[in-house]
Image: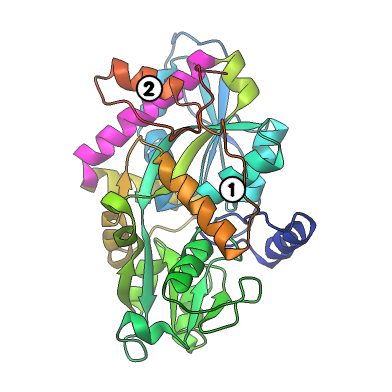
Amino acid sequence: MSAARPLTTLRTIAVVAAFPLLLSACGYGSDAADDDKRTEVAAGAEKLSADEVKIGYFPNLTHATALVGVQEGLLQKELGGTRIRTSTFNAGPSEIEALNAGSIDIGWIGPSPAINGYTKSGGRNLRIISGSASGGVKLVVDPDKIKSLDDVKGKKIATPQLGNTQDVAFLNWIAEKGWKVDAQSGKGDVSVVRTDNKITPDAYKSGSIDGAWVPEPTASKLVAEGAKVLLDEADLWPDKKFVITNIIVRQEFLKEHPDVVEAVLRGSVRTNEWINANPEKAKVSANAALEEESGKALPAEVIDPAWKSITFLDDPLAATLNTEAEHAVKAGLLKKPDLKDIYDLGPLNKVLAAEGKEQVDDAGLGAGQPGN
C-alpha cells in the first residue's frame, strides 16, 4: 500500500487541509483505474439478479484474494451467468470515488480509505462486508546504521503517505517509544519521510532514507537491496493479526442485489480456502495476475518472503480497524470517527454458516440485519 503519484499526494494534502483530520489512502502508483475488463461466463449459465457486478482491487499482493479469485475463475464460478467486470486501482481515493459514482459495486481496499469513505459520506455510501488479508507490513532498515529498535531514534524512516495506514502505525509506535514527532511535518525525534512506495527502494539505495515502515512487496524489495527486517508489525497485535485489506460494497447495490453480493462473498471465502490449501500454486497465480495487470511479475527473492508474511482470511478483524482509527486520532490525523454501522457482516456470516465455517464478529460496529 503506497502513496499515489505527486498529483494525488497534493490532492490528498488538500483534502486533509479542507477536512483536516481525514486519513489518506493506500495504493501503488497512480490513482487512475485501468481499463475495465470482463470475465468469460460459461455458456448457458444462469444469471443472478444483476447482469454484471463491477469489482475493483489493487494489483497488490495484499489483494491476492481478488487477483487469484479472478485469475482462477473462482469468483466467476459462484456468479454463474452474472458477469464480472473488473477495474484495478493504485490508490484508495480513486477506488472510493468509483464506488460512490457507481463505477464499481464491490471493492477490495485497505482500512484507511474504508474509514475515510464511510465517515466522509456520513455512513451513507459503503459497508465493509468481509475481511480479506492480514499482515504484510514491516519495519526494514539499513543494518549498518540501525542495529536495534532504539537506534531508530534520530534516523530517517520512510512511510508511504501522510496519514496512510502504515504512517499511522509508525507514528503510534514512535509515541509508544516515548519519542516526539510532529505528525504533519514528520519532524522530531525520528524523521518520518513520506515516500511513494515505487521510489522507496531507490531512496534507500541512495542513502536518503535509513529504513522504511512499509507493506509488501516493498519491504521485501528493500531486503533484496540489503536491508534487514527489524520489526514485523504483526508482532505488535494480539494473535499477530490486523486488518490490511477489507471488502466493501455500495449500500444501494447490497440492498438491490443481495444474491450477487453473497455470490461474490462465497467466491472470496472459497478463494481464501484455496489459497491457504495451495499456497505455492496461489503465489504463482497471484504473480501471473500481477504481471497481467501491471506488466511486471515479482522476482522470487521478493515474492517468496512477501507472500509468507500475508495471511488470507475472511474475518475483517473489526476490533483492529477500530484500534487503527484510535491510533490516527491519537496521532492528531483524524477526529474521533463514528464507525457505528460501518460493517454489515450478515451476508458473510450466512455464507460462512453454509460452508460450515465459524462466523465472524463486527466488534459492535455492525449494521444489524443483512443488507440494512
- Pick the quarter of the image with the C terminus: top right
Q: What x and y, as percent, mark residue 89?
A: 58, 48
Question: Crowding near pointer 2: few (<14 within 10 Å), some, many (20+)?
Answer: many
Residue at 53% x, 73% y is 199
**Magenta span includes 39:** no
Q: Amino acid at mark 1?
A: Pro
Q: Is residue 334 left or right of residue 44?
A: right
118 left or right of 277 in image = right
In the drawing, does residue 87 fall left or right of residue 131? right
Asked which quadrant contains residue 130, the reply is top left
Distance, label 2 to label 1, CA atoms, is 24 Å
Question: Tag on residue 113?
Answer: 1
**Dominant secondary structure (helix, strand or loop) of the stretch shown in magenta:** helix
Sequence order check: which comes first, mark 2 or mark 1? 1
Q: Amino acid at mark 2?
A: Asn
Q: Which mark is residue 349?
A: 2
The span shown in magenta is: 258-279
For the residue pair 187 and 277, the one nearer the viewer reads as 187
Label 1: element kind? helix
> Residue at 56% across / 77% down in the picture?
181
Which residue sits at x=37%, y=91%?
A: 145
